[in-house]
Amino acid sequence: MSQVHAIAVLTSGGDAPGMNAAIRAAVRMALHCGLEVYGIHNGWQGAVDGGEAITKMTWGSVGGILQRGGTILGTARCQAFHHREGRRQAAINLYRLGIDGLVVIGGEGSLTGARIFAEEWPQLLQEAAAQGQITLESDARPQLAVVGLPGSIDNDTYGSDMSIGADTALHRIVTAADQLVSTASAHQRTFIMEVMGRHCGYLALAGGLAAGSHWVIVPEEELKPRWHREMVNSLKRSRKAGRQHAIIVVAEGARHPDGLPLDASTVRDILMQRLDVEARVTVLGHVQRGGSPSAYDRVLASRLGAAAVKDLINVGASQAPRMLGIVENKIQSTPLAEMVEKSRSVGEHIDEGNYETALQLRGYSFQEQLKLFRLLRQSAPDVKSSQGNLLVLTAGHDVPGMNPCVRVLTRVALNRGYQVLAAQYGFSGLLSNQVKPLAWMEVSGWAARGGSELGTGRYELHEQDLPALADVLRQQQISAMVVVGGLDAYRNLALMQARQQQYPEFHIPVVIIPASITNMLPNTDFSLGTDTALNNIVSAIDRVKDTASANKRAFVIEVAGYHSGYLAIMAALASGAEGMYIPEEGISLQQLADDVVALRQGFAAGKRLALWIQSENASPVYDQSMVRRILEQEGGELFDVRSVVLGHIQRGGAPSPFDRILAGRFAVAAIETLSNMAIESSLDYQCVGLRGKHIVGKNLSAALEEMDWPYERPRDEWFMELAELARIL
Ligand code: ADP
């Protein structure tokens, strides 16, 4: 039994890319569950206005909106809703339509409004009834059920690791920074880039880190009285070391040590006066909110939108108004009252000058990122002790994210006192002793580069290779090793580990960092490169969609996957595809027949475009070209079929912000793990990975036991439940 009869969806406050995906998911999940669903236009203003501002939503009214920025429902700030009369009018409007459940997508302000509205609802209705504006039906639900979703590019919402829109904003910032770097280095210029975040340095810090910028100023960090001196000296040192340009990222909420606002032009004036450099200011402003949402935001918003409706159905008003967010990659509910109080308190601590507390409330990973940023911006290592030679290599297919990973590995390791030696072209280069030292400034600029500067390649080590390999490790005096790579690399290392008794050279601390666009590696929810690949796929599909609107056409799009359906499932969810074929499920003749019937019905009813995503190994028999031919044959006059194979486009281009940040976190954890292994004289090789929001380590043999070997994918794939969601939506 559903706890609600009819629900409404609204977006309020500052718009955020991804809001449309949340609206679409909420509307379609509601219809799928047999509820009536309304869209309220222009946020709370539409609720107060009623009439045409509240419209019934259909399956079709949210079609084709996933890739659009902004919000199709519109958003507004609403003064009237701050007052009880305004809220009473809104209650009357919703009550008259029988609405007893509400999904509100917005920031802290909008969700505060939602909490107050839900609390006052019974009294508001009583008042309206007393004034004769409505008649209270005996079967009407006495409470309004409310679920909020975090929609804010600032990522300042307590109760969600990421808010809807933050990842897209980061894409805009990092793209802008990459572009500034190219012009800055041509002219040896310094750029100061101001990004959004009144009380939250997330965008500035994550953006600065991902772009490999030189300096960041965030509201949570208390600047020292002579902070500018430190900044200027650091810039001088890095120029001397050969850095041609500098990018300084300033959050809009940055402050002087006395608490007064510090803006980008002040930083520019300081640089002009003290460094005598020409510095230019770029204020990104609303560009950060604009444009098509990233793949991550589309997936996040779809998951949250659907979950909000299920929560209204199952829990209704029996629990206090709440917000659903993503915590450790799982959906979590937090009372709105708690969310509002805790989200606000960081800003209040900053205003009062309690920076220490503000930083603490931002959490562990924010502090870690800040620490890492300070280390990376040095112009030379700050070495205290010597640790021996560390070998670094990238192995297997090239993956976007390998370069930022090697950049951070190199600098963190040099700073720890290691000499960093890099093997070129993975294991095959290593076998032929193609090894060279990597210096601090050599990895400058690698944060933004796709592929692998070191060179990589697939190579399976055999027993007969091992003596030569041992020779190289001995000659180069390797005392520790980090490999960034895919499944081949895991296997090669497993072989080396198994021969440690025979070859003492292999008895050293070794860590592997998961890198594979297909996300089929053990001990991690996400491997390096997956996010970039997904974004590449999703933007390619957006273009395919654009070409299709002229004709009635079905597309069968083949994506990478090896033996895992990850990319196909996520691409289907993020692009709104009709269906997907994945290796976990295979393809049956019956399935194809059912899909043909559905397609024929859809096109006969006026559909113009259908997308099918096929994972490369979905079926050994019904490969993509066969699927296309079957659909074409059966489509007859009703529709055309085209096939698209994305191939290497998926691994191309600059790494996404998420991959760059993940690369850095993996690298830091790898060096940390090496140190611990050295202390414990551990024999086990270790893998690092991301579980929830934590970087975890596991020994290689245990990690490989997580694999379903005949299929070469992990037995437990967390994303399989999203296949069902993609199909419903
Ligand atoms: P955001 O949701 O992005 O934080 P705002 O803080 O501007 O944006 O809030 C958006 C809207 O939410 C406001 O214009 C108002 O209609 C409503 N709202 C905000 N705070 C309250 C409040 N304390 N009481 C009632 N409504 C509020």
Image (cartoon, rainbow, N blue to C red):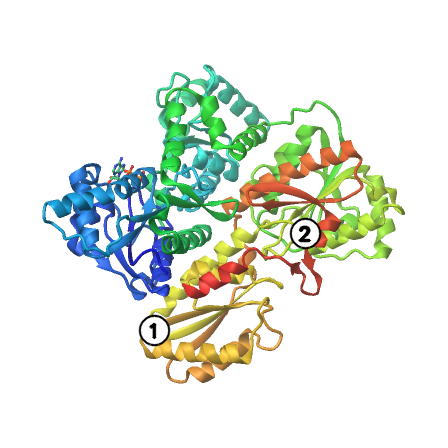
The quadrant of the rendering that contains the C terminus is: bottom left
Count numbered badges in the picture.
2
Is 82 placed left or right of 159 in the picture? left
Circle 1 — which element?
loop
Percent coordinates x, y for residue 143 in the rendering: 28, 48
Mark nearer the N terminus (1 vs 2) = 2
Circle 1 Cα neighbour tier, 10 Å, few/some/many (<14 / 14–19 / ≥20): some
Give the quadrant of residue 12.
top left
* Extreme residue in the right direction: 502
Is the residue 530 above or below the residue 235 in the image? below
Nearer to me, 167 or 586: 586
Q: Are marks 1 and 2 in contact (CB under 8 Å)?
A: no
Q: Which residue is located at x 71 percent, y 56 percent? A: 488
What residue sits right under mark 1 in the picture? Answer: 607
Residue 456's tag is 2
Q: Amino acid at mark 1?
A: Lys
